[in-house]
Amino acid sequence: MMAAPSVLEERAKAADFNTKCFKKERIELAGTVEYIVRGGRDIFSSLPAAFSSVKQVGVIGWGSQGPAQSQNLRDSFQDAGVDAKVVVGLRDGSASMANARKAGFTEENGTLGEMYKVISESDLVILLISDAATANCYKKVFDAMKPGATLGLSHGFLLGHMDTIGETFPKDMNVILVAPKGMGPSVRKLYVQGKTENGAGINCSFAVEQDTDGHATDLAIGWAVAIGAPFSFQTTLRNEYRSDIFGERCILLGAIHGICESLWRRFVMDKGMDEEEAFLRSTECITGPVSRVISKRGIKAVYTDMNEEDRAIFAQAYCASYEPAYEIIIECYEDVACGNEIRSVIAAGNRAKRFPVISPIDGTRMWKVGQVVRSKRSERSDDLIDPFAAGVYCATMMAQIDVLMEKGHVLSEIINESVIESVDSLSPYLHARGVAYMVFNCSFTAATGSKKWAPRFDYNLSQRAYTAIDNGDALDMKRLDDFLNHSIHPAIIECAKLRPSVDIALTGLGEDDAARAALS
Amino acid sequence: MMAAPSVLEERAKAADFNTKCFKKERIELAGTVEYIVRGGRDIFSSLPAAFSSVKQVGVIGWGSQGPAQSQNLRDSFQDAGVDAKVVVGLRDGSASMANARKAGFTEENGTLGEMYKVISESDLVILLISDAATANCYKKVFDAMKPGATLGLSHGFLLGHMDTIGETFPKDMNVILVAPKGMGPSVRKLYVQGKTENGAGINCSFAVEQDTDGHATDLAIGWAVAIGAPFSFQTTLRNEYRSDIFGERCILLGAIHGICESLWRRFVMDKGMDEEEAFLRSTECITGPVSRVISKRGIKAVYTDMNEEDRAIFAQAYCASYEPAYEIIIECYEDVACGNEIRSVIAAGNRAKRFPVISPIDGTRMWKVGQVVRSKRSERSDDLIDPFAAGVYCATMMAQIDVLMEKGHVLSEIINESVIESVDSLSPYLHARGVAYMVFNCSFTAATGSKKWAPRFDYNLSQRAYTAIDNGDALDMKRLDDFLNHSIHPAIIECAKLRPSVDIALTGLGEDDAARAALS
């Protein structure tokens, strides 16, 4: 079995692309040149050409991305006059059939059916079933597809799995990817918002793994535009799964979980803080006000907004936490890149059959306190930023950015995976429900990995960063200069210009049904 | 690259063996038949025949096992009249040269030299350098060896590494393993004790991976007897590394660390217990009195010694903890078996060059309290067993035994790796220094893995076991019957009969030098 190409080889492959239907824009981010395609409803007129070879899109699966992408595609096709049908395909007897029907996909109007039948009739097959299910049935999917049809993925996981066992895609199909940098519910929510505010939506990366007819790039970009991406950038399937599986284990879910646990414990046990106050100054502060500042004005603003006293505390927390966080992050990246994490997820999926009932992980004291704190939100302003918590969180986010830069990912991917997806897509849900709740309720791959890595961040920060501060050890304060002068800050602002600032205050998340359906 | 043989295939390979020099004994453990060789000074007369083809043993490395095995071999050769020289081989300029000289291995008397020179002159090359160093230099070692010489390993790690990259041993050498089921310092300490008490020592597994001359089995057993093994059982290199790398991540180090952290936090934060009392009832109780009871009378005695009230608490803790512990343990086993853990260790070794200075991990509040508690030991009797802590610990140990049985390891291996090594070799050191101290100071492979898995046990027990108890969830109390009727208990007693009960109260561990040298 040959070693998978390096991240840099993959990056070279993704550096440029040709599109016949869309306008490619050159941008500069942190001194490097990238090409993107700007989306928005004003370019929907390009969709008919992009989808000219497609009479039917089969969207397979109704988990997190399925409901969002199928509805967005259907709505966009109608608005743009694309002459193609969106059909949802599910396992026979799937419990999700009822939900698909509620969204207007029915057997009667020919837009709902058994998955392999839908696959065999579609020109573009968008496979949005869980990673474990994908690993189990991909060969059957390949066999069912029409000759010359296009396989669409929203995640490079399948290639990652095939890499670990030395398999490849059949040569006679197109293989493309469009990966929204946000959860399905956000993809739908912001698309709907985009109907009135052109440009709202979730950015996407796209990739062309196989192109048999020279049309794959335009089809991929068209798909991204049709689901509402404000801007799209090219990557490869391999770099996508590396950054994605890694990201959710780190700042998106795993790291933020471990950070919050470690902070709360520190505040209560070591600092004697009241339990609710401690939650307010850790989880609540990070998923709320800190995320909002980053969303609107970038990471550095968290620091520059502070008074001198708070800056000193932030600086100490930042400089003590950067290396302990970096250490875990780079370990995680390398475990993903060598296939370890994918092998673990596949094995966990097989074991899960033996342990079907797993209890939630937010029943501990801290998350119970969190419920109380959230219930009192209306009684107080939601803008308290604890400088220590902010320092730990920002250090971890920056360490993740540095690891991805060091490993050679394109800047658009780094900023979307590490910053925008985190503060604009994940944090609103984390803020509404608590981090541990979301870790438990997200996709199997993300949940499995986050549960694995969260405690690593917790232990390493507690054992190294916090003790260093408490012992008065000399800290490497140059880290703060590195932070303030980092080339990522103007690049984040550049990316922010490409889409409207998103209002991440979620309404209507009060009902458990909505949240559960959204994250299943 | 072919898949490595399964544990069961390996077990079949290890089931029986032929020895010309030693007496093979048939034993029954938990209804299965195994063959062992009983050691002791009274059979040293068999050593000259076992070592007949060996004029020089090269012991390469001076870490944990090197000092113990080289000295034990030299002493045994002298006592038994074996006509072979023990020569220590080290890197040129190694800082360990001075320590080897102190132990009587010198250039002047021809028993100390540069490692590749020693390797090229030895008939049996016992390679005891670190796993990372082994992975880096094994090809050079193979090249340096005399044709027909024997490579001796004390750990299957090298085969595990070669499995992950698809390589094999050169066909013209014998490859054998003797793996003491205890740390180097214990191997030496108990060997010295065995001079007056025949039978004291650390049990060993042995394996014959390649046998070019029909003499490899006797040489392996001879080696085990000469370093003081009370009894030796056969395994394979693959099953050895699977059970060994796994064991240190679980009950030996990783699990016990996570358990202690979770218990202390629970006692202090959720139960309002005084911090010293909480340490006394968690770490101190597990590494001290609970380990001693298991060492002398088996796991079940921990429960049967208790009064009714304590039994009820133990039962609750046991039944709530078994599954959360099992879940992490089987994940760890499968990550080891598929090569993930070995890949991670190799990658961590490469990264370690970038982060040479890593601070200890026992600077947190809990371990500082632990120092105070240990310093007051003389003021109190050291026999308090907290039934809750004991229940959690015993459940984890039993879950590890069940995973290894399920995976098909021989009972001798299971009992030695999961019970005897834990309570007789590790616990005394953990008790003297604290668990986090030992995790930090053990071998790189063990430290890397324990730091990874400890927090997993902590989180899963806190999130699932303790919350289930506090919420009054229905517990699966059948687990207690499974425990009390488990076939492992008589098998442990059977194994205990094969060697004298060990007094694990370590004296002379007060000096930092001794502990550091022992564990480097």
Image (cartoon, coloured by chain):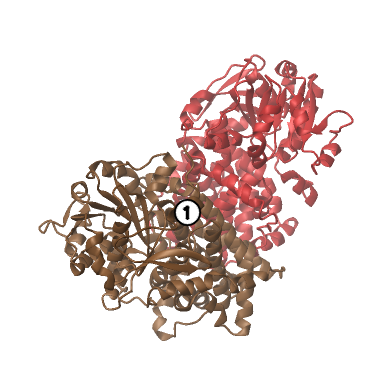
Chain colours: A brown, B red
Amino acid under disc 1? Ala
Q: Residues within 10 Å of mark 1 (few under 14, many from 20)?
A: some
- Indicate the quadrant where residue A22 lies: bottom left
Label 1: chain letter = A
Judging depth in this view, the residue of B515 and B140 nearest the camera is B140
Q: Position of residue A262 (x, y in %)?
A: 55, 66
- Indicate the quadrant where residue A474 lies: bottom right
Q: Position of residue B387 (x, y in %)?
A: 55, 53
Q: Is residue B415 visible?
A: no
Total marks placed: 1
Write the residue at 54% across / 36% down.
Answer: B165
Q: Which residue is mark 1?
A: A12
Judging depth in this view, the residue of A282 and B204 nearest the camera is A282
Q: Position of residue A110 (x, y in %)?
A: 12, 56
Write the residue at 62% across / 45% down.
Answer: B446
Q: Residue furthest right?
A: B108
Q: In the image, is residue B366 above or below residue A379?
A: above
Q: In the image, is residue A139 above or below residue A491?
A: above
Write the residue at 54% across / 76% down.
Answer: A300
Judging depth in this view, the residue of B468 and A52 nearest the camera is A52
Relative horizontal placement of residue A489, taking residue A125 as reference (left or right): right
